[in-house]
Amino acid sequence: MKPFTVRLHVYGDLDFFLPSRTPGGRVERHLSEKTSVKDVIESCGIPHPEVDVILVNGKAVDFACAITGDTEIELYPPGIQSSHFKEKRLQATAITEFVADGHLGKLVRDLRLLGIDVAYDSAAEDRQLVEIASTNNRALHTRDRRLLMHAAVKHGYYLRSQNPLEQTIEVLRRFELGSTLSPFSRCLRCNALLEPAEKEKVIGQLEPLTKIYYDEFRRCTGCSQVYWSGSHFTKLQKRLEQIRAKLGS
Ligand SMILES: [Zn+2]
């Protein structure tokens, strides 16, 4: 096959994934064999779940599209171009279930505090994360680019920031979760939903002062952890306020 040239132009914040010296979000690749557009994109460092619309010579295509000659490729992240090419968007819009990789405990706590369903095990291995993401159709949160490039991962997000508060805001914006939040509805430890519990049913799990000062309780339907509006609650409310302020800014 005659060697050919592929020019990529990325939009939005997809240039985050390109080498820092890449000018104007443009990359050129020289190929000499038929290659899927997914492989071209990922060879430039961009994980496929970050790409919502691909235009090949101006025409919207999916990841399997084969590139065999000189080509102009345009890449758009979710959020822009969503009104154009509606039928050619590659990322699902209404994802509400997630799995997070093992280094993201603080992000997971924030998201669960907001009522968002996030599967998490700090000891999970990569293959387990991929399996949970693919079989349960959960979007994967990670800072491991290679992991996000795994063919079995359909939806996911590479966290740009290393700061948990900023990561939380990134996830809320990327998956448009702002209107679906339900704070204090989910267990921070195990992700199961909470339900109201009568005091007499949980009294055996309470400290002496808690028994005296509190009357309203919630219990986790998964691990039976009991929650009430004690001092930890004030801390969590402060965290919620921080998240809301940052989200609104
Ligand atoms: Zn629980």
Image: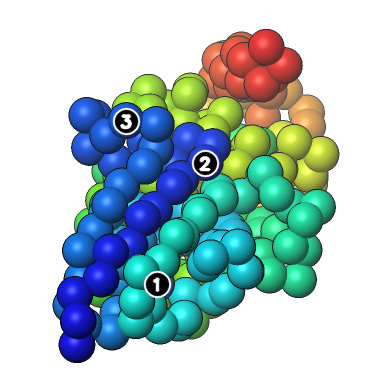
**Which x, y percent locates residue 132?**
42, 73
Identify the mark nearer the N-term, 2 or 3.
Answer: 2
Q: Nearer the viewer, residue 187 or 51?
A: 51
Q: Nearer the viewer, residue 28 or 150?
A: 28
Q: Amino acid at mark 3?
A: Pro
Circles 3 and 1, Cβ within 8 Å, touching? The answer is no
Please tell me whether residue 163 is drawn above or below residue 13 in the rendered image. Answer: above
Taking the spot 52% from the left edge, 41% from the top edge, the residue there is: 11
Q: Residue furthest bottom?
A: 1
Identify the mark nearer the N-term, 3 or 1.
Answer: 3
**Which x, y percent locates residue 209?**
58, 18
Mark 2 sits on what residue? 11
Q: Residue 37 has which mark?
A: 1
Q: Residue 235 has which mark?
A: none
Q: Amino acid at mark 2?
A: Tyr
Mark 3 sits on what residue? 23
| Other residues around mark 2 within 10 Å, as few (<14) / some (14–19) / many (≥20) | some
